[in-house]
Amino acid sequence: MERDSNNPFARMGIIRFWIISTVFWLFFPVSILICFITIGSFKTKQLLRALLCDFFQTLAIILILMCIIIYGIYNHISGFFNT
């Protein structure tokens, strides 16, 4: 686990990581094979961990925002029905 602490993909800048992740997901089945051949199994695992971490963070942010929006709409609309 100590080797994961220096994951180059987790420390990458947002624009560069965004470009790499977009290309990776656009060519998904082939991109894993290409990554495995070109950068090796360990770096491919690091890339996949960074991509999954980014995916779950994005999903959590979207869910939190959706809950806030739904609560705001509910709170606003419920004021019309109180007499």
Image (tube, rainbow, N blue to C red):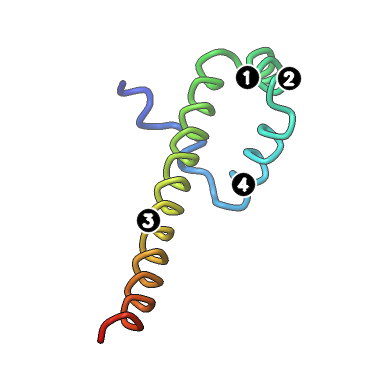
Labelled disc at residue 48: none
- Which residue is outermost to the front? 83
Which element type, helix, strand or loop, lies under badge 3?
helix
Mark 4 or mark 1, which has the lower sequence index?
A: 4
Separation of marks 3 and 4 at Cα, in angstroms:
22 Å
Mark 4 or mark 2, which has the lower sequence index?
A: 4
Question: In the rendered view, would you say 56 is above or below 71?
Answer: above
Label 3–label 2 contact, CB within 8 A? no
The quarter of the picture where residue 29 lies is top right
Disc 4: which residue: 18
Mark 1 or mark 3, which has the lower sequence index?
A: 1
Separation of marks 1 and 2 at Cα, in angstroms:
14 Å
Amino acid type, label 1: Ile
At x 36%, y 70%, the residue is 74
At x 49%, y 40%, the residue is 55
Mark 3 or mark 4, which has the lower sequence index?
A: 4
Disc 3: which residue: 64
Question: In the rendered view, would you say 58 is above or below 9?
Answer: below
Mark 3 or mark 2, which has the lower sequence index?
A: 2
Report the mark closest to the observer, 4 or 1: 4
Amino acid type, label 2: Val
Disc 2: which residue: 30
Amino acid type, label 3: Ile
Amino acid type, label 4: Trp
- Residue count near mark 1 (Cα–Cα under 10 Å), binned few <14, some 14–19, many ≥20: few
